Each structure stands twice: as structure tokens, then as C-alpha cells.
Image (cartoon, grey):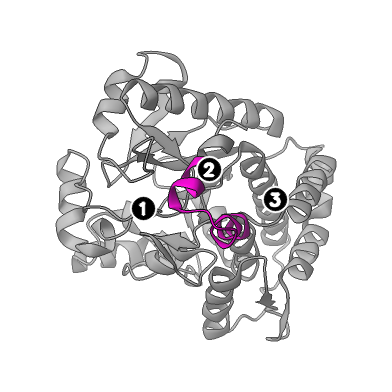
Amino acid sequence: MAQPLTVGAEEEFLLVDPDSGAAVPAFEAVIAAAPSNGAAQRLKPEVSAAVVEAVTEPHRELSLLADDVRSLRSAAAVAAEMAGCAVLACGTELVPGPYMPPTSGSRYRAIHRKYGALVFGHIPCGLHVHVGMPDREHAVRVSNHLRAWLPTLQALAANSPISLGRETGYASFRSTWWSYTPVAGPAPLFTDAAHYNALLDSLVASGVILDRKMAYWFARPAEEVPTIEIRVMDVCPTSDTVILLAGLTRALVATCLQAVERDAQLPPVSEQLLSAAHWQAARYGLEGDALDMSSGRPLPAWTLVERLVKHVTPALSDAGDLALVNDLLVELRNSGSWAGRQRKIIQEGGNLTDVAAYLRSLFLK
């Protein structure tokens, strides 16, 4: 039996005042406070100075990925505390406050100038899952097969119903807001890697994006490592949810890779229907109906989750992940979605500080 594909995770965490939960531009202080060795060396900058990104190593076993995720979260929490702040795994800013400056560095300042309030008006924090690929050609073709399934992963991860002090009406406001950037949302269909590279080169030449890393599609071949990167998910409060999503994502990518290798025909997908499915996933998450891409009809979101699991069950079994993923799904379903849990605190009389405290309490779980 072939080895499982490698899987890794990048988590973007919000740096906040430990009392109010408001964002603070503390990235440089956090890095200065971090140890000079170990997991802290994989804490990286993002565009906003109020965000720190934790980057795991690639792993073939979910148990090792889980250890890595927890180690990085612990390192981030310790460094933040030493710098006088805290870390939240939340898709958007909860508490209103002043605009956050960019992280120091010419690229981040250029992005800030280019996109204005799209990057400094809100701070989006996502979970990006990387799955190993044989080469770029396979990654591009796999991205074509992924498209119809990604709204379900988006709904599972929805964790940003509140933004800047307001109930947005969306389970994942992060993905809705981020879709306004010029090269975001569902990836186009590509004939091959040459087609992908030519389009990216054209976009960079146009000046709309500054470099190839700014193609923020929901799935894309990574530029620096031999992986496909799935970018559709909000960052999640617990490491268990990260492992659930990483396991499902790897199994979905493995299933699509098998389809590519047997030259399976792509299922017909309407571009407008696909955009609508992503909007529906962002709007309702797991709490309402999702859009069934095969029929164009609404179905309960959990029905589509069950279909996804059935679709990738052989890949989950091959990787030894089926029991763990099923257990984590049952736990999530019984406890409620992360968007729903944030809302429940407010509905029961809590405030934004209570929501922030709740999310902080889960960070090392």
C-alpha cells in the first residue's frame, strides 16, 4: 500500500489585548519574546501586525500533525503572554478598534497600500491545509476536481460570525470579506500547469497582484513547496478541529488525485452555482441548508458533510484516519458549530469579551 500523502497546516492567529479581546499590533514583540529554537521558529508574519502564523512540518500521520499543531499553539501562547498579549483562533476581529498597521517589510507595506481597507479594515484569519503532490501538473489537475467539494469544508470550518463588534449574519464572514480581493474565491478550471502559470504571469504583469503568492484562490499549487494548498477554511478554536479538517482535506485530495491518475471526467460544475454554494456555506455554515452541486437544490449542510465523508471513506481508511475523523465529526455535531457557539454566548447575555475569553480557553485544547 502506498504511503499516505503528506499533510501540513498553517494557522493564522489574532493577537489581542488579554482583557478586552481587541486586536493589538504585537507581532514583532511576540517574535522577540519567543525562544530562539524549537517550535517558536515556525511562527511567521502575516500582512497585519496583529496576526501571527504558525506553520507545521509536513506529516504522514495525523497523530504527528496533532502533536505539531499543539506544540505550535503552545509556543504562540507562551510568546504572546511574554509580550503582554494573548492569541485567539478566530476568523475575524471580535472587538472594534483602530486600524492595525502592516507588519514591517516592504512586501507587506506594498500590500497594505495596494488593497487599502480590504486588508486593514478587517483582519481575516484562516486555516490553510497543504497536501503533498507528485508535481505541479498533478496539483493543477487535482484543483479542478476539488472545486465542487470545497463549500462543504468551508461550512465545517465556519468560525467568524462576529466582526468588529457586530453580528454579521454570516457563519464565515472572513471568507465573504476576503472574496473582495481581486484573485480570490473558487479557482478557475485549468487545462494544465502551463495554463495556470500563464494566467498567474498575466495577473502579475497587470499589476492587480504584486506577486504569484497573491493568487488567493480556495485551492492552488503552492509556490515554494510541492503541495496543493486548500485555503477555504476559517482558523478554528481547537486543535481537534484542525485535525478533523486536515484529515478530511487530505482524504479529499487523495480521492481527487486518484481521479486524475485514471483520467476521470470532471463532473460538470456551473461557475455561478459554485459561487452560490460558497456564499451559502459562508452565510449559514452548518446551521442551515447548503447547495448540492449535483442538483442545484438546497440540502441540510450535514447531509452534504455525510456525502463528503462517504466520498472519501476509502482514502480515510487507507490512511488509517477513518475512526478518528468520524469521532471528531460526531463531537462537532453534538457540540454545535463554532459559529453557533460564539452566537450562543451573545444570545445568552454575554458580551464580546466573554466570546474572546471562551475562545482563549479553547486555544490549547
Horizontally, is 264 left or right of 57 in the view? right
Q: Which mark is residue 359?
A: 2
Residue 229 falls left or right of residue 308: left
Quadrant of res 63: top right
Q: Residues within 10 Å of mark 1 (few under 14, many from 20)?
A: many
* Magenta: main secondary structure: helix
The earlier-in-sequence mark between 2 and 3 is 3
Q: Position of residue 11 (x, y in %)?
A: 48, 41
Is 344 on the left-hand or right-hand side of 29? right
Residue carrying label 3: 248
Considering depth in this image, is 357 or 52 the residue closer to the camera? 357
- Spatial CA distance of label 3 from label 1 is 32 Å
Q: Amino acid at mark 1?
A: Val
- The disc at residue 95 is 1
Kind of residue indicated by mark 3: Leu
Q: Which residues are magenta?
A: 339-357
